[in-house]
Amino acid sequence: MRRALLAITGLAASTTALVVLKGAPGTSQAAQDRPVAEAPVVPGGSAAPGPTSGGVTNSARPGATVKPSAKAGASRTPGTRTSATTRATTAAPRTTTSAPKATTRTVTGPVVSYKYGSLQVRITLSGSRIVDATGLGMPLDGQSGLRSDDVQARYSGSSGEVVAKQSANLSTVSGATYTSTAYKQSLQAALDKA
């Protein structure tokens, strides 16, 4: 019998504590959403006297209603209520954890004339990083074409020396000194433009 009485008393005390803590001012969502100017309604349909936004108390008249104030900076007090049209909602700023997306752009260097013809270099950048390089207008026939192929194979493409070194400081292709020099000049000009 005593155990049952102690269990019931403990249950009642914990329930009371829970209700008191949940009902404390500032913890209830309903208490936080009510504007200052709206007076609570008492039985009988009239508005009970309550504080206004200026701190002056309204006297209740039978049949009179108090309209809520739409002032944006009004402070809130527990026990007042807000209608959906006067509630001011402020959203917290959103933060993102993803990095901004890099823009991909293409820059073309000038046409450089050299002993075996002329060429120019086009680079593709993602942000400030070179992701591709290509030689344009390079000679295709004879010994000049072979030299051009060697230079293209070494420098150009997404796995070429330009992408690997991220600069125009490239090693000269053996047997294609003029073509290599022209490629590096156009590449440097493209990098300067980028």
Image: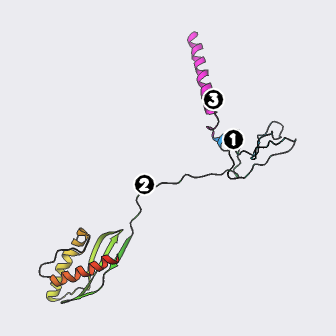
Question: Judging from the image, what secondary structure is the residue with disc 2 in?
Answer: loop
What distance separates the C-alpha of mark 2 from that of mark 3?
Answer: 40 Å
Query: Which disc number belongs to residue 20?
Result: 3
Q: Main secondary structure of the magenta part?
A: helix
Secondary structure under tag 3 reads helix
* Dot 1 alpha-carbon crowd within 10 angstroms: few under 14, some 14 to 19, many 20 or more: some
> Is 11 within the magenta?
yes
The amino acid type of the residue labelled 1 equals Thr
**Residue that protrudes farthest toward the front in the picture:** 55
Q: Which residues are magenta?
A: 1-28
Please identify, in this view, whether the residue under mark 1 or under mark 3 is nearer the observer. Answer: 1
Instruction: Name the amino acid, label 2.
Output: Thr
| Picture coordinates of residue 109, whole percent (x, y) | 30, 81
Q: Residues within 10 Å of mark 3 (few under 14, many from 20)?
A: few
Q: Is residue 148 visible?
A: no
Residue 179 in which image quadrant: bottom left
In the depicted view, which residue is nearer to us: 59 or 61?
A: 59
Residue type marked 3: Val
Residue 100 in sight in this render: yes
Q: Which mark is residue 97?
A: 2
Q: Which residue is mark 1?
A: 77
Tell me which numbered mark, 1 or 2, is placed earlier along the sequence. Answer: 1
| Left or right: where 61 falls relative to 193 | right
